[in-house]
Image: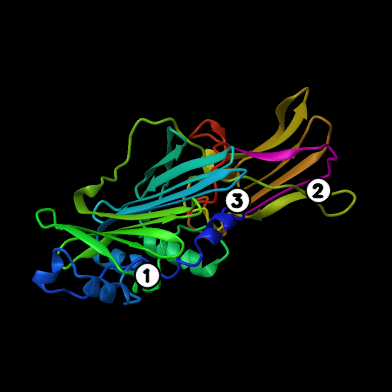
Amino acid sequence: MGKAPILVLLLLAPVLSGCLEVPIKPCEDSECFPLSNEVLQGILSDPSSFDVISMATTESKLKVESLTTYSTETQQGEIFWSVAKDDDAQLRSVAMRLSLGTTSIDTEIVEGASNTNIRLGNVWYEGRDAVPEYKEPFFDIAEQAAADPEGFWPSFGFDTTSISELDWTITGDILDQQQVATGVNETHTIVLEMRGVPPRIVGIELYGFDDSNFVLRVYTDDEFELQLQDDLPRSAIEFTIGDSNVLNSEITMWGGYVPSGFTSEVNPSELSFHVLVSQSDTESSIAEMNLAEIEANVTDEDGNWWAFNYWDYSGDGWFSAGDFYEIRTNSTVEARIGVWDHWASSWTGELSLPNSI
């Protein structure tokens, strides 16, 4: 999925860079409504004039959204990101929508408490985390993006110095403390929205002459609400076991570690490994082990053995990132390993969410 939006991002590469920041230089009252062209140019010439990380440091309640759209002769596409936090409520939200031609993905995760909310399209589900740990999302995403710069991350960066020399038409509403500036360069019409005294940039809109657009907006305080819903359908954890490896002509193995991106902690007794075999277009389980058993040796109806092992590698008592699992067999039957989530009464990974942030 990370490769699909590359074309979209390239369309806006000349103007998207750096971080999303707020103006830190105050202006004289007489210049604030509306700003003079020279004062705005001075604000934009500061490379640190629009920085999400700085905003996340000072704002306990913050939401940033971006929408990138493009159109070619053969298809249209868009990428939408929304990242929000409420430090006081210890809640965070990450939403992503990707539309590319006829393909669409639309998800959101709200977390921070023992129950989580997961949206897939228009349907909400309830997830869980036995040991909830609130992570400030903007710093968390920045760290992940630095570790994996080729990954698929929110496009919250904008280099204001690239538009600092434009001539701006500026209007202001002193009652609402709102100002709107409009400028044009060789490729885009650019609209900036500012609020407050001194003025703070809360919106950037780029409308390309090639039908590519980019809209970035910032919300704080009472401009949005972040909360968890109750009594939703339960969702199984997003964990699956991959394909097998043949160790030699007699032994087949499935094994590995729970990935670091798995951020929940789950009681091992709520999960069971199942050996699933297809028969007449249906799957049936021929061997299983509940993870609370830690290890088991099972003989199937054909006399073949199945050795299950689960190691709480972190020693925290939960099924969590870093834990190790292994299933070995002498059977030659074509099978896959499924994980049954007893809490959700469904197989894990069924929601098919993209990589979690």
Q: Nearer the viewer, mark 3 or mark 2?
A: 3
Residue pictured at 49% horizontal, 33% vertical:
344
Q: Nearer the viewer, mark 2 or mark 1?
A: 1
Residue named by callout 3: 1
Residue named by callout 1: 163
Q: Is residue 98 left or right of residue 55?
A: right
Residue named by callout 2: 252
Which circle marks residue 37 in the picture? none
Q: Is residue 150 left or right of residue 263?
A: right
Give neighbour class at mark 2: few <14, some 14-19, many 20+ (Cα, 10 Å): some
In magenta segment, residue 172: no
171 or 260, which is in the foreground? 171
Q: Tell me the CA gap for discs 2 and 1.
A: 60 Å
Residue pictured at 76% horizontal, 29% vertical:
278
Q: Tell me the CA gap for discs 1 and 3.
A: 32 Å
Q: Position of residue 105 (x, y in %)?
A: 53, 41
SS at mark 1 in the image: helix
**N-term mark: 3 or 2:** 3
| Residue span colored magenta | 324-339
**N-term mark: 1 or 3:** 3
Q: Position of residue 3 (x, y in %)?
A: 62, 55
Q: Is residue 38 left or right of residue 177?
A: right
Q: Amino acid at mark 2?
A: Thr
Q: Main secondary structure of the magenta part?
A: strand
